[in-house]
Amino acid sequence: MDILIKNGTVVTSKEIKQADILVSKDKIDSIKPCGSFHEEVCLKVIDASNMLVMPGGVDVHTHLDMPFMGTKSTDDFRTGTIAAAMGGTTSIVDYVIPNKHESLKKAVNKWHKKAVDKAVIDYGFHVALVPPVDKILREFDYLVEAGITSVKCFLAYKNSLMLSDADLYRVFTKAAEHKLLVCVHAENGEIIDYLTKKYLKEGRKEPVCHADSRPPELEDEAVSRVIKISKLTETPVYFAHLSSKGGIKEIKRAKKNKQKVFAETCPQYMTFNQHKYLSEDFEAAKYVMSPPLRKYKHSSYIKKSLKDGIIDVVATDHCPFNFNKEKQRGIRDFTRIPNGIPGIETRMPVMFNEMIVKMGMCLSKFVEVNCAKPAKIFGLSQKGDIKPGKDADIVLWNPDIIWKIKNKNLHENVDYSAFEDYVVTGKPVTIISRGEIIVENGELKAEPGRGLYINRQISNSAYS
């Protein structure tokens, strides 16, 4: 179907202009001054007057239907991608988490089965590397063939996901040979493990101990260590869910020295502070995630770093667990609270409110960190911007709507929103994915299974 989007304010990562967009089949055909196209030849005409016309969001950090800590995340690829679409996101990259000793191919096939008949938007995969790594390092050829051009290493979660420094060095070396981008969860897992056991021995079991056992200095140290190993092996590195001022300062120094280092943060680390853990009841468990929330000086510095271009990407780390069910596993022991919060539907509205309404940043900057840069860094060459030839993933955004986030009105399969009662200005109202209207005036039009797997390319940002 040819779709004409007319009279809108078109926002790309480079410019803002009044223009009309012609969509032909699943691609953006052309962008011309308003009134340039003949409406009568189009099957669908959308008047975008007073609307922002932006690329669909690209969320490169999600955990759908993921087994974790004795349970699993509550959104599967149906509910999770529906929620993403309703929030203005049209592409995700989800993390495949293999079992110990499981081949990467087997794990990837398992994730394909989770997604293929359920996703309503397009999706790709990263693959986490679970120790021991000896055999899986030999599967890196397979990853590239399968369109998976990034892997993840955990420096936390001792005795399950955590890699040693020696294994990290080996992964970096092998990844560079295959031009894979290495994503890292950077915290000092050894000291976290020590502090966790210390608090339990002292009888401290409340949710705040989760944050106390993972102080920001342990993130700072791990970021610094990884940067050095990355430089030693000449391997690009991408830091997931950064939350600490010291860690971001390390990245700023590395970037100044022309090292290929990329930085991601999440809305929660910009909008919330550590006081969320101080409630007298178990409500604090809603905000147990890794890394944990930090003091105000950290969130303030993250905002500054986003504005200054040190932070490249805003993603969600969407990993939902019901407060009244899965989170209750840790009511008597903070180590049993599943780590993670929901946010796949609220990312784009919350970031629009933070970046544009509150901080006065440029609309193109919003598109850059939420759409264009994540797509570019992770080889989603057809996604993330509005240009002729790219996939017609387009969001019509009403910048004037003022609304309050209520979990009862969201589509995430979880019993709370971390952003409950957060007042937002601006909202996506119509969403187009590959030329198909999947959300119209806030109503879902897409069927599960229409989402396609994305064979990602080697990252030009990392290996140019």
Image (cartoon, rainbow, N blue to C red):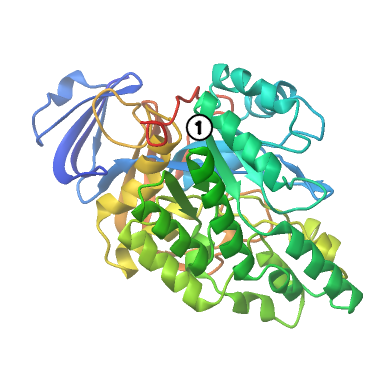
Quarter holding the N terminus? top left
Picture residue at 44% right of the left edge, 41% below the top = 58
User: Left or right: where does residue 47 sit relative to residue 348?
Assistant: left
Extreme residue toward the front, this view: 232
Give the percent coordinates (x, y) of residue 8.
Answer: 20, 43
User: Left or right: where does residue 168 sit relative to residue 19?
Assistant: right
Write down the residue under mark 1.
121
Give the percent coordinates (x, y) of residue 24.
Answer: 28, 20
Picture residue at 65% right of the left edge, 35% below the top = 170
In the image, 14 versus 85, the foreground residue is 14
In the image, 125 versus 440, the foreground residue is 125
Circle 1 crowding by C-alpha within 10 Å: few under 14, some 14–19, many from 20? many
Dividing the picture into quarters, in which one does residue 167 lie?
A: top right
Dividing the picture into quarters, in which one does residue 186 lie?
A: bottom right
Give the percent coordinates (x, y) of residue 198.
Answer: 85, 73
Q: Is residue 230 visible?
A: yes
Picture residue at 79% right of the left edge, 53% below the top = 158
Give the percent coordinates (x, y) of residue 108.
Answer: 68, 25
User: Left or right: where does residue 234 sit relative to residue 37?
Assistant: right
Picture residue at 59% right of the left edge, 60% below the top = 407
Amino acid type, mark 1: Ile
Q: Relative to 195, is 7 above or below?
A: above
Quarter holding the C terminus? top left
Q: Relative to 49, is 207 above or below?
A: below
Q: Is residue 79 visible?
A: no
Number of on-image labels: 1
- Circle 1 sits in a helix, a strand or a loop, which is it? loop
